[in-house]
Structure formats: structure tokens, C-alpha cells
Image (cartoon, rainbow, N blue to C red):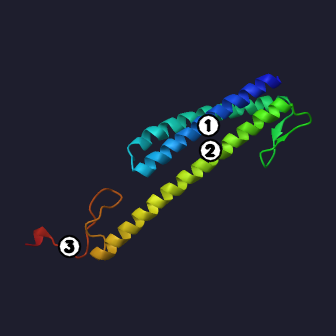
Amino acid sequence: MNQSLIQSLQRETEGIQAFGQLLAEERDALKRGDFQSLSGLLTRKVELGQALSRQLKAREAQMGALGLRAGPEGQLLGRQVDPAVADAWRQLIFAARTARDGNALNGAVVNAHLDFTREAIQALRQHSGGDAGLYGKDGKAAAGAGGVSLAAG
């Protein structure tokens, strides 16, 4: 049973590392401004996330059958922990923390882009005296108070 758990831990670790690779590709696309490729990356991330979720459930069932569980800080808890299981667990935790950090970095990059865009829009609004010439969330041009109506003649 320990060997089966070790194999599950290794497969999950490989899946998390693959997810981390997708995060790196996403970060590169964000840095290059290649926002078109983000949709495909998102699809791949969702698919991999679903596969990881299934692996997690299977692994947790295996761990439960062996009397093992994860502690609040990610430590492996149980009466008798096989050293090979503990090693595979440490590799899994390391991969998960690396992916978490990559995801946080991507979030920071996205937030920086959003902040820049908000500031640019605010500068345009201040310069134009309102929303004149800007598009709203619905994709239509905002009608500014100082606009000229062609129908007014």
C-alpha cells in the first residue's frame, strides 16, 4: 500500500510541476503583452486543475487508509510514516509551494497591469474633463457632457 501511495504522490507532484510550468508560460505571456495566448493557457490550467483535484481525492483516500493526514503546516502526520512516503510527501509540498508562489507572482503582475490601466484611464478622464471619448463596460462610447451633438445643427 505504501508503494501505491508513493506513486500517487509522485504523479500529483508531476501534475503540480506541470501546473507551475503553465504559470511560468502565463507570466511570460503577461510580460510580453501577449494577451491572446492567455485564453489557451487558462483552458489548459483548468483542465490540469481538474486532474489535480481528482488526484488529490484519490491520494487523500489512500492516506486515510494508512492512518496518515496532512497537518495544518503541510507536515505529514500519522503513527508510522514510511521514510519513502515522507520523502515523496516533501517533494509534493515543495512543488505545491513553488506553484503557489508562481501563482502569487502572476497575480502581482496582473494587478500591476490593472493599476497601470486604471491610472491611464484616470489621466485621460482628467485631461478630457470626464468620460468623453472613452468606452464603457458595454463597449459603447461614453457620452460626455461637453460633447457636440450633430443633430443640434
Q: Position of residue 55 (x, y in %)?
A: 67, 31
Residue drawn at x 54%, y 57% as measured from the top left? 108
Pointer 2 residue: 99
Look at 85% across and 32% down and name the residue there: 83
Instruction: Tell me the tag on residue 115.
Output: none
Q: Check the image and report above or below for 56 versus 29.
A: above
* Label 1 Cα neighbours within 10 Å, binned few <14 / some 14-19 / many ≥20: some
Instruction: From the viewer's side, name the closer residue of 29 and 58.
Output: 29
Residue 2 visible in image: yes
The span from disc 3 to disc 2 (Cα, nearest Å) is 50 Å
Q: Amino acid at mark 2?
A: Ala
Q: Which of the image's four quarters has the N terminus?
A: top right
* Placement of 96 over or under 9, stated as above or below: below
State the image quarter where residue 61 is shown. top right
Label 3 neighbour load within 10 Å: few <14, some 14-19, many 20+? few
Q: Position of residue 46 (x, y in %)?
A: 53, 38
Q: Which residue is found at the position 33% from the left and 76% from the top?
A: 126
Q: Earlier along the polypeptide chain: callout 3 or callout 2?
A: 2
Q: Which residue is mark 3?
A: 147
Give the labeled residue for mark 1.
17
Q: Can residue 49 be seen by looking at this rendering?
A: no
Q: Where residue 19 sits: x, y (%)?
A: 58, 38
Q: Amino acid at mark 3?
A: Gly
Q: Are marks 2 and 1 in contact (CB under 8 Å)?
A: yes
The CA distance from mark 1 to mark 3 is 54 Å
Q: Secondary structure at mark 1?
A: helix
Indicate which disc, 1 or 3, sits on the residue closer to the N terminus. 1
The quarter of the rendered structure image containing the C terminus is bottom left
As shown in the figure, which amino acid type bears the numbered disc 1?
Gln
Q: How many marks?
A: 3
User: At 64% across and 35% down in the image, what residue appears?
Assistant: 53
